[in-house]
Image (tube, helix red, strand yellow):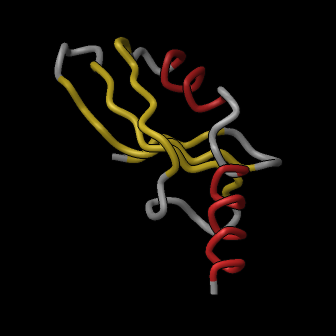
Amino acid sequence: MTTRLLLVGLLALGCEDDGRGFRALEASGFTDIQMKGYAWVGCGQDDAYSTHFAATNSAGKRVSGVVCCGSLKGCTVRF
């Protein structure tokens, strides 16, 4: 059981955003971006990275969501 939990934890760390999610948010006009870490839910099976974020949108409102990035596709921002 302990080995299984360790493996799951290591896999989750390996799925952290590689910076593409941050760049996707910047390109979409978000500012004051805070990446919050791995998102267990919110992305599809084919997404390699899923990261929670909080940011300020172009209207000045604070928003939060998930950035999903695939190995062979771009990133998707979900609220």
Does residue 44 appear to the left or right of 35 in the view shown?
Answer: right
Q: Position of residue 23 (x, y in %)?
A: 60, 20
Q: Position of residue 49 (x, y in %)?
A: 64, 48
The answer to whether 52 is drawn above or below residue 54 in the figure is below
On-image quarter of the N terminus: bottom right
Residue at horizontal 29%, vertical 20%?
57
Residue at horizontal 19%, vertical 13%?
60
**How many marks do you count on the picture?**
0
Give 34 or 12, whichever is nearer the viewer: 12
Does residue 72 appear to the left or right of 62 in the view shown?
Answer: right
Does residue 36 appear to the left or right of 68 in the view shown?
Answer: left
Does residue 75 appear to the left or right of 60 in the view shown?
Answer: right
Q: Residue furthest bottom?
A: 1
Picture quadrant of residue 55: top left
Picture quadrant of residue 22: top right
The answer to whether 5 is drawn above or below residue 61 in the figure is below
The answer to whether 18 is drawn above or below residue 49 in the figure is above
Q: Residue furthest front?
A: 2
Q: Position of residue 11 (x, y in %)?
A: 71, 61
Give 14 or 46, whichever is nearer the viewer: 14
Residue at horizontal 57%, vertical 47%?
68
Q: Position of residue 26 (x, y in %)?
A: 50, 16
Residue at horizontal 70%, vertical 58%?
10
Give 20 or 12, whichever is nearer the viewer: 12
